[in-house]
Each structure stands twice: as C-alpha cells, then as structure tokens.
Image: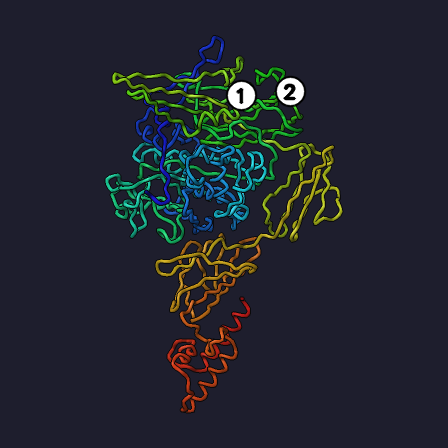
C-alpha cells in the first residue's frame, strides 16, 4: 500500500452520478414542494471524473467564463522564484496530504504580507473527523483517515473551522485530543476566515475547453496562489531521474489518490522526461508534502496530460478579526447542485432564513456558485412577518453582479443591513444564466443498499452522510422559488430514490436526501470598530484608520495610554497596540497589536549531494540560521526563498535557485541580507558547522577549543621550526592540524582562535 496516499471509497458517488440526464427529487404529498432535479454528467469523460469526486460545485459548468480574457502568461513560471512559497513539509507518518494541500493554499493567501506564515495541518485534519461533530471514520487514528471528497475540507474551512497557527496546534502534539471543543469553540479560535474557495475543472486535455481551463489555473498561480490538486499516484509512474510524473495504468502496481499543490508550470517540459509518453509536452510544477529529501527537494513535475488530475481549488482568507459572526446551515459545505426542471433553470431564487443572535450589521454574503457567467441579485429582508416567506419583510437595496468563478465566494453588500437581536431575517438570491443550468447549491446525501440472493444486505453512504445532514437541517431554514411568488421549504422536498429488482433475486435501492442551501450571512456586531489593516506587521509610516458602521464617535488608545477621540489616521512608528471602542451602548473594546514589517527570508534550504534540509534557529536566537555538514564538506548548495533581493556580500542569490557556497574547515559564517522596497532590510548570520569525527583544534582534549589550544599549537610550531622534536603523538598532531593542510603552524593557531571567538559569540 502506498505509504502516504489516500484511497477513494466513493461507491455512493457513482450511484448519484448515473448516466441518466437527471434525478428527480420530489414530494409525494399534495401541495408540497415540486420536483427538484440533481445535476448529472452527460459527457462520459466527466463520468470518469466522478470516480474521484462526489456531486459537487464543479460538476456541471466547464468553469470557463466568457468574460475571461487570456492574460499574457510566460511559458515557464515558478512561485519559488517570486519568493511566494512556504517551506516543504512532511506529512509522515499520517495520511494527511489533503490537509497539507489545503493549508498550503491558505498560507499562500497571506504570504505576501506574512512571509513566515505557518498554519496547522493537524487542526484541519483532526476537526474534519473529530468524534464530536466531524465526518464518520473507522480509522484508529483520525490522522490516518484520508479525504475522499474535496468538499470535506472546503466545507469545514468555509464554515470558519480554522485555520490556526502551527505554533498553537503542532503537527505531532496531542493538544486537540485533550480539548474536546464544540464547533462554536473551534470557530472562535480561528486565526483567519476563508472568504473564497474557488474550484477549477480539469477535463481531458484533448477537449476544446481544456486550454481555457488550463489558462485559468495558470492565471491564479501567476497571481500568487498555490492551488490544491489531486492525482492518482504510484511509484512505478514516477521518473526519479527527471522528477516527472504521468500516470500509466499498465505500469501501476499499487496506486492511490494523493493531494499536492500546483506552484508553477513549464509549457516546454519534454514528454520524453516521463516514464510513459503523455502525448504532449508541458507539466505543472508541484509541491509535495513528503519532505525535502523526496523528488527535487520536495517538488516534481506533473504532466498536463494526466487524465486523473482533479479536485483543483484555491483558498483566499481574511483576518478572523475582520468579521465577528457567520450565519449558516451548511456546516459541511456543498455536495450537490439542483434545478426546478429536468433541463435546468435560466432563473431561480433561493434563500436562507435566520434569527439574529445579537444586534449587528450584515456586510456581505457568501454563496456557492455552481456555474460561470451567472448573474446575481442579492436582497436582505429584515423583520419578516411570515416564517414561510423569505420576502415578507423589509427589503434592502439590491446588490447585483456576475459570477465568473465556481465555488464559494464572498460578495460585499452595496450597503450594510441593520439586524436586531431576535429578529427574523433572510438572504434572498436570484440567479440567472443564459443557458439552462443547475443553479441551486445544496447539501445532499445518499444511501444505497444491495440485497443479495441470500437475503443479506450491503449498504453504502455518501461521504456527506444523512446523519450529518440532519444535525442542522429543519423546517423554516432554506427555501427556493421559481419566480418569487411562491416559496417552498427544502424540508418539504421528499427523499428521492427507487428500487431495481434483478432476475437473479438481487435488488438495488437508492435513496437521496436533500438538505440546506449553501448560503451564508457575514455579520459584524453592533458597535464593532473596524481597522483598515489587520496584518500584524506594518512598515514604518503606514496609516491605520478606524471606522464604525454606526458612524458614531470612536475612542482609542495607543500602548495603553489615555483614550482619546479618533479624528484621523494613526501613523505607525514602531511596535504599537491600538485599542478602540465606538461610542454606543455596547462599548466593546477592539484591539490590534502591530510590529514592524521587515524584509524576510521565507526559507533557506541547504543541499548536500542527495540530502537536503532547512537551516534552523536555536531557541532564543534572532536572525541566526544554522546548518550542520559532514566532515570534509567544502561546498554547500543553498536554495533561498524570499520576496526581495538576497545577497551575501557582492553575490546575489536568486530566489528559488541554487547557489553554491564555499566552506572552511570547522565553522563558516556568512552575512545574508534581504531587501524589499519600503521595508527595513534584514541581515541574517548564517553559521555552517562541520561535524567532525575528531575534535580538530581541541589539542589538549579538555572538550573546549580555546586560546589554550592555540597557544600549544604556537609552541609546537616554534619548537619544530627550530628543527627540534616537540614530542607530540600522532593523535595530537591530527587534532592540531586544524586546517588539514599537513602542516602545523601559526595559521592553525589563528584559525583555532577565530573558531573560539565565533563559538563564544554565537553559542
């Protein structure tokens, strides 16, 4: 079995995605909701994709917007050279590749402002399957449960279930197992909130739409995003000489799904570099999660033509402090798209109805879009008088536009909408598309049973199960309408399904259960003070503005000084804590702590022959990076990553490229500087330590290399210089020949003194 891959167990998704054009979901009682129809694949190629994906947000549309113009993109691109990738990590020994791919995309959403960002993979992996509220699992260890559907991680993250910093939940810690937190408690600890989860279809490379799909992926990477992607992985299909991969079923012996990250591309990567001919040149540059000693320092090339590529998505985030409340019912995300007619809809309305927990302001709406080039109109209705009619209240101004991407997207309202605690309110969305499409994003679960000829029954559930669906599904939550005049409650939609009996006495029963609509309201509490910048590192001179939707006076303090009336921007001039409150009946204090942004080195990889590892920092050291090499090593290859100019003396080290450093015996030091426009430059002291089999320089074998040893070497050199025998053993002479040049002289003594000084300075 593949060491780190996760295998798909998706029998139920095959049942949902049957060859039929649509599956009706209907109510049998008179007066109940009319039929709903589940989106299906008409293209056999897409049916094959379904073996890797359950019905999802990208099952219908080809993902290419007519509004997208092909940008002028280079033939070769590498985010390492832009300084926009975090270090390669190692998922060993768990099956958490999917969490590493997701977190890599999360990190890249913030890396331009926070080059040292490091988010927790364990937090996502653990809470996706935790016993209290997660997906069902049979694994002994939660971290050994792979992801079977990208909607698992997307659903968790768009529900604000993290992410958090790696320092708060380290990969190998047991802190989460000891906490046993509820969903609300987990949400409250999030460091960032996902505002966008966009998916990219990847149909077979020989189709007409493929170039546009590939161009959309390139454009996203070019803008600095790291895109999660899945492929079918097997060792036999990997060319270790060229670090190139193309799946060939005739070679595969033990294969499984694996998730990684697209961070670049090369249109000219030769087809001859793969173990089997993919039929075309070109490959994606992919960052893996198997450590730096696999592949090309943790990277490899994945052929454009690999037909098993799927599940591509990018994530965007904002600081968790930017908004305070999320109203939703789709805790686990989208798992189906529906229409009111068999052929799909050109126009449809849907809504979620909520009760306000507290006074606040709705500022934006997050919805899941299932097609591109879809027009939207968003209206918020407050003070609803009919709990069965989402439009029975006071309408807000309409926010409208066009959706050109697939997946969850946050749309800011033209004007914030006031909410009163206990008030029933609704978000109503009207979607229109020139083509008939399946426009309603929804939760959907299936249950299937096979009755064998002996009467025994085998059953299977979709990844998103009925039990999970029922946790937050009830009447009066989600509604849909063909024209806005008559609304139907999703709870009135009956289960779909049928039973097929076969001549051999066996039978097959399928049942589909609809849930809530994927639509969320993003809210700030009454009296919330908004900061213009939530990045915790700012350049000197940056101006910070404060605002409140109520347009009421704001009072603030800097570094716990006296509160004063806010009248204009606050200029950042050094480490600063700003506390502020709006002059309302709430007077909640909001706080941001800022430190000075510097030019940062994101990572520095050392490479010796076939071994590589990152430079490390000892606890308590600042801007000192260390690396250990084996005895006799005279050069060290380094690969730095930084979004700025990197230099050692007069030598420029290009980001994402290998530079060779010459080493001395013992300890070699370098001063490496990183410079970025408008930021303070940073100088790092690099210390490369030669690990010796004997302790050269410790001539008296007292465990220290110091001036005493240097003095003994000088005495020896003086005596032998007079042609006399100093009476030292061969072992002593080996330790004294610090420079290993066959001579014991003043240069050895000088080198020992330099080493002693450096050791004292950098210890």
- Disc number for residue 565: none
The reply to whether residue 261 is visible in this rendering is: no
The reply to whether residue 464 is visible in this rendering is: yes
The residue most toward the top is 30
The residue most toward the left is 250
Residues packed near mark 2 inside 10 Å, few (<14), some (14 to 19) or many (20 plus): some
Query: First in sequence: mark 1 or mark 2?
Result: 2
- Return the residue nearer the eye: 700 or 517: 700
- Return the residue nearer the eye: 541 or 321: 321
- At which x and y percent is residue 229? 39, 39
Rendering quarter of residue 433: top left
- At which x and y percent is residue 628? 44, 63
Is label 2 in a helix, a strand or a loop? loop
3D distance between C-alphas at marks 1 and 2? 21 Å
Residue holding disc 2:
383
The residue positioned 42% from the left and 81% from the top of the image is 744
Residue 603 is left or right of residue 268, and the answer is: right
Q: In this view, does 318 lie above or below 341?
A: below
Residue holding disc 1:
474
The residue positioned 72% from the left and 34% from the top of the image is 586
Q: Quadrant of the C terminus?
A: bottom right
Residues packed near mark 1 inside 10 Å, few (<14), some (14 to 19) or many (20 plus): some
């Amino acid at each position: 079995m593949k060491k780190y891959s996760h295998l798909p167990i998706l029998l139920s998704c095959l049942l949902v995605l049957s060859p039929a054009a649509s599956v009706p979901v209907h109510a049998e009682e008179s007066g109940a909701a009319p039929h709903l129809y589940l989106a299906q694949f008409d293209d056999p190629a897409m049916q094959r994709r379904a073996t890797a994906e359950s019905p999802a947000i990208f099952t219908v549309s080809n993902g290419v917007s007519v509004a997208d113009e092909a940008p002028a993109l280079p033939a070769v691109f590498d985010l390492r050279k832009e300084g926009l990738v975090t270090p390669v990590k190692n998922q060993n020994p768990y099956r958490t590749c999917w969490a590493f791919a997701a977190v890599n995309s999360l990190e890249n959403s913030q890396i331009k402002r926070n080059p040292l960002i490091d988010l927790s993979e364990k937090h996502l992996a653990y809470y996706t399957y935790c016993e209290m509220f997660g997906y069902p699992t049979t694994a002994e260890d939660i971290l050994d449960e792979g992801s079977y559907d990208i909607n698992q991680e997307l659903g968790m993250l768009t529900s604000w279930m993290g992410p958090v910093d790696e320092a708060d939940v380290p990969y190998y810690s047991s802190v989460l197992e000891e906490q046993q937190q509820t969903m609300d408690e987990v949400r409250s600890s999030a460091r960032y909130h996902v505002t966008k989860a966009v998916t990219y279809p990847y149909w077979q490379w020989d189709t007409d739409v493929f170039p546009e799909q590939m161009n959309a992926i390139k454009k996203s990477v070019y803008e600095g995003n790291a895109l999660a992607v899945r492929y079918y992985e097997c060792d036999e299909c990997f060319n270790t000489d060229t670090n190139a991969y193309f799946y060939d079923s005739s070679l595969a012996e033990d294969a499984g799904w694996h998730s990684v990250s697209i961070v670049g591309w090369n249109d000219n990567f030769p087809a001859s570099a793969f173990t089997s001919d993919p039929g075309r040149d070109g490959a994606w540059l992919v960052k893996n999660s198997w450590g730096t000693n696999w592949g090309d320092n943790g990277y490899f090339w994945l052929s454009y033509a690999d037909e098993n590529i799927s599940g591509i998505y990018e994530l965007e985030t904002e600081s968790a402090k930017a908004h305070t409340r999320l109203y939703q019912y789709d805790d686990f995300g989208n798992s189906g798209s529906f229409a009111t007619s068999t052929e799909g809809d050109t126009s449809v309305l849907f809504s979620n109805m909520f009760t306000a927990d507290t006074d606040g302001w709705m500022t934006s709406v997050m919805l899941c879009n299932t097609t591109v080039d879809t027009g939207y109109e968003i209206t918020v209705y407050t003070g609803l008088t009919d709990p069965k009619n989402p439009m029975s209240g006071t309408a807000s101004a309409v926010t409208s536009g066009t959706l050109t991407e697939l997946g969850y997207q946050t749309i800011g309202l033209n004007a914030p909408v006031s909410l009163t605690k206990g008030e029933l309110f609704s978000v109503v969305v009207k979607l229109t598309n020139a083509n008939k499409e399946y426009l309603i994003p929804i939760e959907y679960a299936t249950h299937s049973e096979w009755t064998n000829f002996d009467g025994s029954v085998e059953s299977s559930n979709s990844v998103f199960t009925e039990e999970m669906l029922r946790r937050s599904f009830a009447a009066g939550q989600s509604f849909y309408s063909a024209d806005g005049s008559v609304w139907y409650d999703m709870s009135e939609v009956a289960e779909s399904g049928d039973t097929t009996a076969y001549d051999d006495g066996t039978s097959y029963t399928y049942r589909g259960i609809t849930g809530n609509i994927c639509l969320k309201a993003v809210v700030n509490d009454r009296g919330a003070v908004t900061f213009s910048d939530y990045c915790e590192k700012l350049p000197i001179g940056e101006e910070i503005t404060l605002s409140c939707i109520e347009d009421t006076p704001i009072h603030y303090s800097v570094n716990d000084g006296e509160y004063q009336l806010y009248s204009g921007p606050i200029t950042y001039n050094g480490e600063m804590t700003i506390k502020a409150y709006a002059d309302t009946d709430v007077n909640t204090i909001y706080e941001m702590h800022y430190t000075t942004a510097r030019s940062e080195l994101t990572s520095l990889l050392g490479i010796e022959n076939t071994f590589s590892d990152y430079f490390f920092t000892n606890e308590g050291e600042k801007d000192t990076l260390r690396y250990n090499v084996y005895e006799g090593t005279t050069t060290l290859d380094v690969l730095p990553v930084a979004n700025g100019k990197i230099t050692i003396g007069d030598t420029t080290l290009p980001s994402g490229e290998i530079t060779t450093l010459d080493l001395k015996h013992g300890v070699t030091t370098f001063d490496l500087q990183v410079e970025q426009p408008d930021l303070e430059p940073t100088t790092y002291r690099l210390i490369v330590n030669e690990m010796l089999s004997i302790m050269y320089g410790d001539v008296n074998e007292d465990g220290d290399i110091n001036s005493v040893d240097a003095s003994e070497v000088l005495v020896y050199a003086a005596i032998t210089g007079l042609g006399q025998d100093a009476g030292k053993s061969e072992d002593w002479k080996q330790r004294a020949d610090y420079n290993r040049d066959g001579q014991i002289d003043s240069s050895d003594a000088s080198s020992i003194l330099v080493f002693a000084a450096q050791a004292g300075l950098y210890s």
